[in-house]
């Protein structure tokens, strides 16, 4: 399975996360960039809907296939210890998959409840 790396880096006078060579927006603090990277990484792993897709290969031939909404990459937030500024502290341990599922399920229930009430 593919692993997508979200790396915390100094960028444009602040902090950002990057995936491959693409940078996020710049954040004032290391902790803000780390939190944003963790949120983006968790969202990247969320299942979507299964869809029929069409694509063209390099030879110009068209193909059809079904892309499973559950075929999501694994993500990893990479943070180098000792990089953050003296007035900041490292973030807590990342959540385990079951913790993430429980948090997202609770969030979904809360949103559903609020939408039904309005």
Image: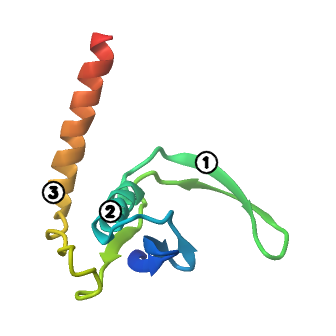
Distance of mark 3 from mark 2, alpha carbons? 24 Å
Labels 2 and 1: the sequence-earlier one: 2
Q: What residue is shown at x 43% (from left), y 72% (from top)?
A: 14
Coloring applied to the structure: rainbow
Rendered-image quadrant of the N terminus: bottom left
Discs 3, 2 touching: Cβ within 8 Å: no
Labels 1 and 3: the sequence-earlier one: 1
SS for tag 1?
strand
Q: Where is residue 75 in the image (x, y as percent from the top left)?
A: 36, 70
Q: Position of residue 36 (x, y in %)?
A: 36, 60
SS for tag 2?
helix
Residue 92, disc:
none
| In front: label 3 or label 2 | 2
Distance of mark 2 from mark 1, alpha carbons? 37 Å
- How many marks can you see? 3
Q: How crowded is mark 3: few (under 14 residues within 10 Å), some or many (20 or more)?
A: few
Q: What residue is shown at x 23% (from left), y 87% (from top)?
A: 81
Q: Position of residue 113 (x, y in %)?
A: 24, 21
SS for tag 3?
helix
Residue, disc 2: 32
Residue 98, disc:
3
Choose top left, top right, bottom left or bottom right for residue 87.
bottom left
Q: In this view, does 116 lie above or below 73?
A: above
Q: Would you say 73 lies left or right of 107 here?
A: right
Q: What residue is shown at x 64% (from left), y 52% (from top)?
A: 53
Q: Residues within 10 Å of mark 1 (few under 14, many from 20)?
A: few
Q: Which of 102 and 7 is in front in this view?
A: 7
Q: Is residue 1 visible?
A: no
Choose top left, top right, bottom left or bottom right for residue 93.
bottom left
């Amino acid at each position: 399975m593919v692993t997508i790396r979200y790396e915390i880096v100094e960028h444009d006078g602040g902090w950002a996360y990057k995936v491959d060579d693409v940078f996020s927006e710049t954040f004032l603090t290391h902790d803000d960039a780390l939190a944003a990277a963790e949120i983006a990484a968790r969202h990247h792993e969320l299942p979507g809907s299964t869809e029929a897709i069409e694509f063209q290969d390099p030879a110009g031939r068209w193909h059809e296939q079904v892309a499973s909404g559950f075929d999501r990459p694994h993500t990893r937030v990479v943070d180098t210890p000792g990089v953050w500024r003296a007035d900041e502290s490292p973030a807590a341990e990342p959540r385990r998959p079951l913790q993430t599922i429980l948090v997202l399920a609770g969030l979904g229930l809360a949103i559903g409840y609020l939408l039904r009430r309005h």
